[in-house]
Amino acid sequence: MREIETKYRVQDLEALLLALKSAGVELGDPMLQDDQAYAPAGWKPALGKVGHTFARLRTLSGGVHVFTTKTPLANSMECAEYETVVADRKQMHGALLVLGYEPTVRIVKHRRSGSAGPVGVCVDVVEGVGAFVELELLVDDDRDGLTVQAELDAWARGLDVALERTTDTYDTLVRAVAS
């Protein structure tokens, strides 16, 4: 599967929530997500993300652990993605270290999820970074990622809420704040 997304910094969270509700998007209750991001050994931000496979271990409210790999394709918001539930976060962490991955940053956020047709809508409050909305489409075909991102952007702009588009991933944003 490929995940194609756009992400926006939110200036007024309440205005966004009202606009999403008006657009027919019903969001679930906030769920805590505690993510540890990993990069291949020796990877540095100056190398860029495209073509490198990154990993993430996520623990959700309730103790479910999810392992994900993402390989950015055209840009960091279009990725080949694999994801599965794992039984033991500590063991998976050890396996990643043995495979040559290095922990980079911890990302803690409160996420509310919903959908607008096939588009996933995630409203995130990321600790230390702020509020964001992500629009995500999972595809298993060859449609052009940049075209899909333009369509997602047009939908976001149609909400008529102050949004600042960013192409940075949460690990990049958290790393910038920590620096």
Image (tube, grey):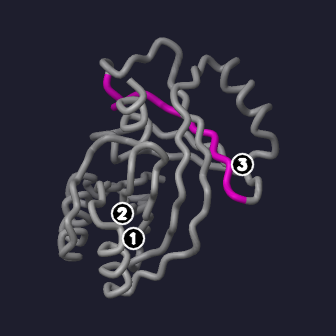
Q: Earlier in the sequence, mark 1 or mark 3?
A: 3
- Of badges 1 and 3, nearer the viewer stands 3
Mark 1 residue crowding within 10 angstroms, few (<14) / some (14–19) / many (20+): some
Q: Earlier in the sequence, mark 3 or mark 2?
A: 3
Magenta segment: 48-61
Disc assigned to residue 135: 2
Write the residue at 41% across / 81% down.
Answer: 25
Is 140 on the left-hand or right-hand side of 16? right
| Count of numbered circles in the view | 3
Is 102 on the left-hand or right-hand side of 64? left
Q: Which residue is mark 3?
A: 65
Dot 1 amino acid type: Val
Residue 88 picture quarter:
top right
Write the residue at 48% across / 53% down.
Answer: 1
Pick the front one: 113 or 55: 113
Percent position of residue 29, x then y: 58, 73
Percent position of residue 44, x then y: 39, 17
Is 66 on the left-hand or right-hand side of 106? right
Dot 3 amino acid type: His
Measured along the vertical axis of the image, is residue 39 above or below residue 153?
above
Q: Residue furthest top?
A: 42
Q: Which residue is mark 1?
A: 119
Q: Mark 1 and mark 2 in contact (Cβ < 8 Å)?
A: yes
Write the residue at 32% across / 87% down.
Answer: 22
Is residue 60 inside the magenta stretch? yes
Is residue 66 inside the magenta stretch? no
Dot 2 amino acid type: Leu
